Structures are given as structure tokens and as C-alpha cells.
Image (cartoon, rainbow, N blue to C red):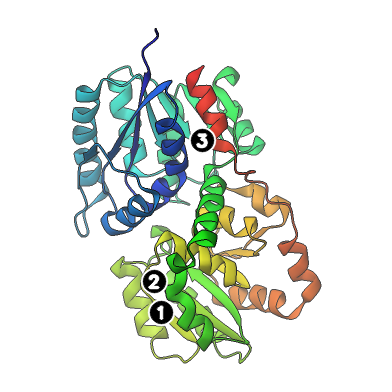
Amino acid sequence: MTSPRKILSVFGTRPEAIKLFPLVHALEADSRFESRVCVSAQHRGMLDQVLSIAGVEPHHDLDLMEPDQSLDALTARLLTGLGQVIDSEQPDVVVVQGDTATAMAGALAAYYRKVPVAHVEAGLRSGDIHHPWPEEVNRKIIGTMAALHFAPTDTAAAALRRENIDPAAIHVTGNTVIDALHWITGQIGRQPELAADLAPLEGRFAGRRIIGVTTHRRENFGQGMESIADAVRTLAERPDVAVVFPVHLNPNVRAVMNDRLAGLDNVALIEPLDYPHFARLLDIAHLMLTDSGGVQEEAPALGKPVLVMRETTERPEGVEAGTARLVGTDSARIVAETACLLDDAAAYDRMARAHNPFGDGRASGRILELLAA
């Protein structure tokens, strides 16, 4: 009898956990695999929320989060810590997701040991190594080492082929974030109390169209964050809208938003949301303003337009499909583009009804079969 193939899944942040827990669930339920999980806890609290909700218990927890640690210090600690885990586990394949320092260091540690790397959400490219920073370079580094590239879209697969990646190693699977969103919305349907904490805000803002806002990108720290805050403040002057803004824990975000937006009647600056409550925010929002990558994929699955507060995106499929629009961080442009969607029903409907290019909720099953093969 063939022994199960040992798969070590490595991740460290909330977005990675969201996008990998459907695959971890699938691996755990399949006798062809021995599933092992290592978390770096690059983001501690927000990671733990997803682990708890998804019922994932890591076999290794490096607990590497420290306040204001530099990227080079974090990367060094990740590389040595993950290397020790790979040495102890001796996996057949190491799975990493996306573009974080954890993903890059996990791939590099596996490569140093000649362990094949499978890259979930491979091939995303903005074409600018400083936007998103450092994620664009992290993805490119992983791409040079991975043995299996699980591209979410045809566009991502084409980007890999342009970089001379072996076409036989590239597989279009869809994005596991849609698998996760389907799973959590099903859970909320069965257990509404999972997302009940937003009910007071829903009551407070009844009759107003809710604008959901998220922002955390490093390249927006400073002037970009200030401009985003100014745009939100201007939009909040409209009596027909309300803003629900889960404020990232990073002090570069919090200080600016608290300084410029605190105390406004129709702006709710709230703590970061756990996954069920964030899914609920997407559901009740009229539109989303974000610099996040994942929101560009998730919101369209629920028919919500996305205005992307960045200069570039490594997810051009959304822009091409019409589900997302790049608006940068200029305050006047953010306000103008948002007002267009608020005031022009036809413009709103074009974005809300556009086809979501990021998947059908069956990406994990496809990845499972490719790992088995």
C-alpha cells in the first residue's frame, strides 16, 4: 500500500489562512495525504481568528510577531524557523500561498532542502516592484523556485509563461478565496450569531448606503493614508451614506484615521473584523473602497463594486472584467469615482453585475488532485 503523501502547508497572516484553510480541510479529509500545518504568526491576533473559525490546529507555531520589526529581521527569523520545521517534518511538498514574507521564506527554506514547492495563487503581477511592496518581489522570488504553480486565472498563468516558467508546471485552478467565502457564508447561514456583532451598526445606519473601507498597504503609509482619510471624510458629508471602516492594527494606519475621522456621526471606525463579520460587511456594503488584494476578489463574488486605492494591481482581471476600478490615493479622484457609483445607477449596475473572474468555489478540489498526481 502506498504511504500518504506528506504535505506541509505554511502560512502566517490572516489572508493566507483564509485562502489556505479550504485546502487544509480538503487535505485532512483525503486519505492520500498526511496534512501538516505550520504557522509563523507573522500576524498573531488576526491569524488566530481564522484558525479558530476554520477549526485548523497548527502542528507548528513559530509565534514570530513582534511590534515594528523590520522586514529583514522578520525574514531571517522566518527562514531559520521554517527551515527547522521542514527538517523535522521531511515533507514531500511544501505549500505556500500568495506573496507574504512567510510564503517567500517558506519557499526558500524548502528550496534549500530540495523539497518541491507548490505555490497557491501563483502568477499575480503588477509589473512594478514597488507596488505592491514588498509583495510583488516576494511572488516573483517564489515563482523562480516553485515546482507547481496554481494560478487563479488565465491572466496569471500567462504572466508565468512570459517569465519562462515550464508550462507543464502551471495549472489554472481558480482562487481558493472564493472557496473560503462560500464556506463562511454557508456557516453564517446556519449560525447567524457568527456575524451578529454588526447588527447595531446595521440598525444605526439603516436607510443609508454603506461604504466599506479597508486600507493597510505599506506603500500608502504617510501621504497616501492621509489622502484616503480626507476622501472618506468628504464622502461622509453626504447624508445618504455611512462608512464602516475596520481600522488595521498598524499604527501607521491607526494614527492617521483616528486623527482625521474620529467623532464623525456616520463613520464607524471599528476594530479589525474576524472572518465571519468581514464577510457580513461585504454582504451589507453598497461598495468597497480598499487597497487590499483579497477584497478585489471577494467583493465581486457578492456583487459589490470595488474601488482600488492603489496605483497598480496584480489582479488586473477584475479591472478588465469591470468588477474593480483603480482609483489611486488622490482624494479628489476617490471622491469622484465613489460619487459616480452612488449617483449613477447604470454605472453601479455595470460593476455589480460584471462576471467575477476569480473562481467558482472549487479551486481546492482541483489543487488536491494536482498534488495527488
Relative vertical location of residue 344 with respect to residue 56 in this rendering, above or below: below
Residue 78 visible at all: yes
Q: Residue furthest right?
A: 346
Circle 2 is placed at which residue position? Answer: 247
* Mark 2 → mark 3, Cα distance in angstroms: 28 Å
Given residues 254 and 31, the one toward you in this image is 31
Circle 3 is placed at which residue position? Answer: 122
Q: Residue furthest front?
A: 190
Residue 184 left/right relative to 255: right
Relative vertical location of residue 215 with respect to residue 75 in this rendering, above or below: below
* Mark 2 → mark 1, Cα distance in angstroms: 6 Å
Tag 2 and tag 1, C-beta contact below 8 Å: yes
Question: Residue 240: x, y in percent?
Answer: 63, 88
Is disc 3 placed on a helix, strand or loop? loop
At label 1, the amino acid type is Leu
Question: Residue 339: x, y in percent?
Answer: 67, 79
Question: Residue 288: x, y in percent?
Answer: 57, 68
Circle 1 is placed at which residue position? Answer: 269
Q: Quadrant of the N terminus?
A: top left
